[in-house]
Image (cartoon, rainbow, N blue to C red):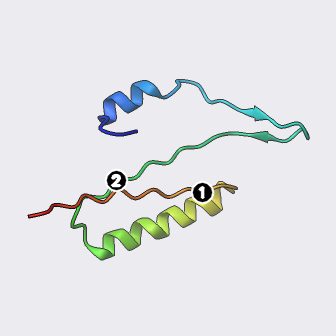
Amino acid sequence: IIDISPDDLKDELPERHYKYQHDDGRVSYPLCFIFSSPVGCRPEQQMMYAGSKNKLVQTVELTKVTDWAVIKVTLY
């Protein structure tokens, strides 16, 4: 998703939770956790996020985690 406002993103997400039934009988509940950090954020704040994300992954027993980073580069 590129160039989308938080309100537009909210409108794109479903209102109800979905689950997937696998062929072997397992049930998966997709979860999307979105975090944004301002450019120039202090390293302490970035470390706090990393620790919070790891705790979330452990607590809800996520099986697949994907991190995306968008870096804005300004050329002079």
Point out which mark residue 36 bears.
Answer: 2
Q: Is residue 24 left or right of residue 66?
A: right
Mark 1 crowdedness (10 Å alpha carbons): few <14, some 14-19, many ≥20 = few
Tell me the residue that label 1 is attached to: 65
Type of amino acid under label 2: Ser
Above or below residue 8? Residue 22 is below
Q: Is residue 48 left or right of residue 33?
A: left
Chain-order first, disc 1 or disc 2? 2
Taking the spot 46% from the left edge, 68% from the top edge, the residue there is: 50
Q: Is residue 76 left or right of residue 48?
A: left
Marks 1 and 2 sit apart, C-alpha to C-alpha, by 16 Å
| Horizontal and vertical percent position of residue 63 | 70, 56
Identify the image quadrant of residue 73: bottom left
The residue at the far left in this view is 76
Taking the spot 83% from the left edge, 37% from the top edge, the residue there is: 22
Identify the image quadrant of residue 75: bottom left
Q: Secondary structure at mark 2?
A: loop
Type of amino acid under label 1: Val
The residue at the far right in this view is 24
| Horizontal and vertical percent position of residue 27 | 79, 39
Q: Is residue 1 left or right of residue 42?
A: right
Identify the image quadrant of residue 1: top left
Name the foreground residue: 49 vs 72. 72
| Horizontal and vertical percent position of residue 12 | 44, 26
Above or below residue 48? Residue 38 is above
